[in-house]
Amino acid sequence: MKGLLVFGLILISQFSMAQDTICINKTIEHKIHSEYLQEERSYWISLPLNYSDTLSYPVIYVLDAEWRFDLIRNITFYLGADGKIQNSIIVGIPHIDWEEKRGRDLTFSQSRIEYDGEKVDSTWYNDSNSGQGMKFYDYFIHELIPEVNNNYPTNNYETLIGHSYGGYFGGYILSLNHPFEVIHIYDPSIWFSNGEVINKLKNSNLQKEVKIHLTYQPIPEFHKSKIEEFISELKKNQKVSLTTEFYKNETHNSLFLDSFYQGITKTNK
């Protein structure tokens, strides 16, 4: 009877370990002190089905993780499990005090125009809420990505998911020495600083081939027109492999779900 009890405990233990290996869909939090941002930042990790550190995986980086990480990690987990996409490591990048620091992290200037084309003054966009994107970019590229690569078995196939300001950020860094093979740009704030992202692209020689999945919706017209101008420039660039989707019946936020599903199945293969 005692031997049977011991065998049962071993079996339960092995089953629990197997479950943890076979079905890992939890969030692992890490912290990193950034010299560029001069503060401690968190990042979140989600691992794919049958994760093993003897394999290597593509990585999907998710901006605005407070709102987007759980959605993306669940969709990616099940698509990977079904063989629709590659099993991938998801990295969520949350903000500190998102009401102010989100804008500071994700923008590279201080706009004097709003999303509907209205002119604004320095009380709208200033040092407190915008224009420090290069510091965040340096943290991202020189601190966060190397740490992820040191801690997890990655294969240097990296995707960035950006929506709104995050989409503007993804468009802006095309002109920089970025590491991404894929950038998803959902209803991006190309209107910011009256389309500076468009001008950056026009005046840059892209060094790296990149797949871009860009989606948008029609309201307001100024916002839409700037995105379409950006799309026109992307189509001219031989380094860019572009797919787009116009959601005429969706809103700025509601298009996110289908944007990610369609985009990841097109670009993560």
Image (spheres, rainbow, N blue to C red):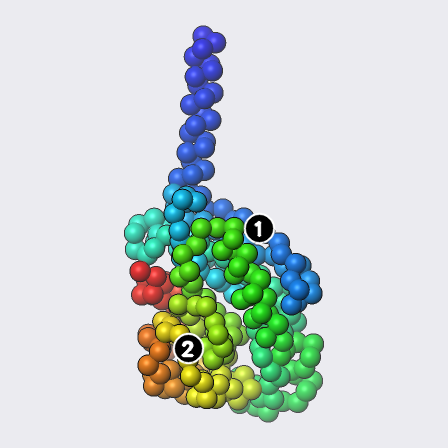
Q: Position of residue 166 (x, y in %)?
A: 51, 72
Which residue is the extreme one toward the top?
1
Q: Do the residues labelled 2 and 1 touch (CB within 8 Å)?
A: no
Q: Quadrant of residue 187?
A: bottom left
Amino acid beneath label 2: Gln
Is label 2 in a helix, a strand or a loop? Answer: loop
Picture coordinates of residue 258, whole percent (x, y): 37, 65
Q: Is residue 121 visible in this depiction of the protein?
A: yes
Taking depth in this image into account, of 221 and 235 the one nearest to the observer is 235
Asked whether residue 164 appears in the rendered view, the answer is: no
Badge 2 or badge 1: first in the primary sequence: 1
Residue ID for mark 2: 207
Q: Is mark 1 on a helix, strand or loop?
A: strand
Packing grade of label 1 (10 A; few <14, some 14-19, many >=20) is: few
Identified at 41% across, 49% down, the residue is: 48
Q: Is 56 drawn above or below residue 251 in the view shown?
A: above
Q: Which residue is drawn at 34% across and 61% down?
A: 268
Q: Name the residue under label 1.
A: 29
Indicate left or right for 49 with 173 as reference: left
Identify the residue at horizontal 58%, vertical 88% (top origin): 113
Relative placement, left or right, of 97 versus 28 is right
* Residue 42 picture quarter: bottom right
Q: Nearer the viewer, mark 2 or mark 1?
A: 2
Amino acid of disc 1? Glu
